[in-house]
Image (tube, helix red, strand yellow):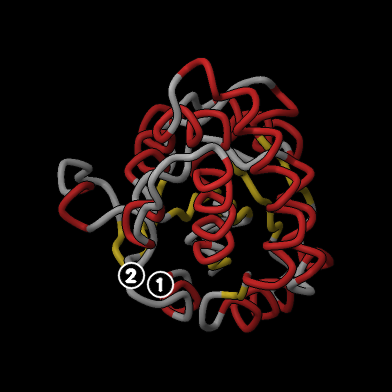
Amino acid sequence: MSNKKLFIFDLDGTLADAYRAIEKSLNFTLQNLGLRRVTFEEAKRKVGRGDKAFMETFFPESAISKALLIYRAHHKKALKSHSKLRPYAKELLRGLKRKHKIIAIASNRPSFYTNLILKSLGIKRYFDFVLCADEIKSNKPNPKILNVILKKFKVRKSDAVFVGDMDIDLETAKRAKMDVVFIEGGSSHLRAVRKYKNKKVISSLKEILSLYN
């Protein structure tokens, strides 16, 4: 692991599994506004670009503002009840800490909900920095979020790696000219990221410790 100083993680689908909370909040909002419910898979495949973009996928433009208010209010409770860690997430974070690595989050999820997840899952203490798109007004795949983290810790791109579960994460890393790891089982299928040649693919978070050991 000596060749990487900084490990940057996406949150949803990468370290945490909040898909059930997302699906429940979305369907609550759809039902409230008289629209048809969607399946778990329909909801899961549309996340990752921030909650406003998520609402734009399912609601007409005239209803987006109202939908966001309903969704966000419901989501505060849903996240606490229906979020969980992906397998080996805590073991990975502990292992990186034992190696004195810098650990950060780069998420398109609004900062309030990101911190809510980190606290409710008991992993906030492992992170040296948590940065969300709303704090810098720039969503992935714009590489600004990664560049800000690199600059904060004065780490060269060659000494860092970004771990994510979506095509948007791999596009962000490509634009930032950073190494990237794609973890299967999140929002994007492997076939959606085949075009990204310079990536490592894993099926479990525990593989990261052996990849960079």
How many numbered marks appear? Answer: 2
User: Residue 206 versus residue 48: which sits nearer the camera?
Assistant: 48
Q: What residue type is disc 2 on?
A: Ile
Name the image quarter holding residue 170. Answer: top left
Whether residue 97 sits left or right of residue 1 in the image: it is right
Is residue 22 placed above or below 170 in the rendered structure?
below
Q: Is mark 1 on a helix, strand or loop?
A: helix
For image coordinates 50% across by 44% down, the residue present is 30
Whether residue 14 sits left or right of residue 97 in the image: it is left
Name the image quarter holding residue 35. Answer: top left
Whether residue 101 sits left or right of residue 45 in the image: it is right
User: Residue 162 versus residue 138: which sits nearer the camera?
Assistant: 138
Closest to the camera, between mark 2 and mark 1, is 2
* Image spot of residue 131 (x, y percent): 71, 40
**Distance of mark 2 from mark 1, alpha carbons?**
9 Å
Mark carried by residue 211: 1
For image coordinates 76% across by 54% down, the residue present is 76
* Image spot of residue 32 (x, y percent): 58, 44
User: Residue 25 versus residue 147: which sits nearer the camera?
Assistant: 25
Q: What residue type is disc 1 on?
A: Leu
Mark carried by residue 5: none
N-term mark: 2 or 1:
2
For image coordinates 37% across by 53% down, the residue present is 38
For image coordinates 26% across by 46% down, the residue present is 198
Whether residue 137 sits left or right of residue 21 in the image: it is right
* Image spot of residue 119 (x, y percent): 82, 65
Mark carried by residue 202: 2
Classify 10 Å Cα crowding around label 2: few (below 14), some (14-19), many (20 and above): some
Contact (CB < 8 A) between labels 2 and 1? yes
Classify 10 Å Cα crowding around label 1: few (below 14), some (14-19), many (20 and above): few
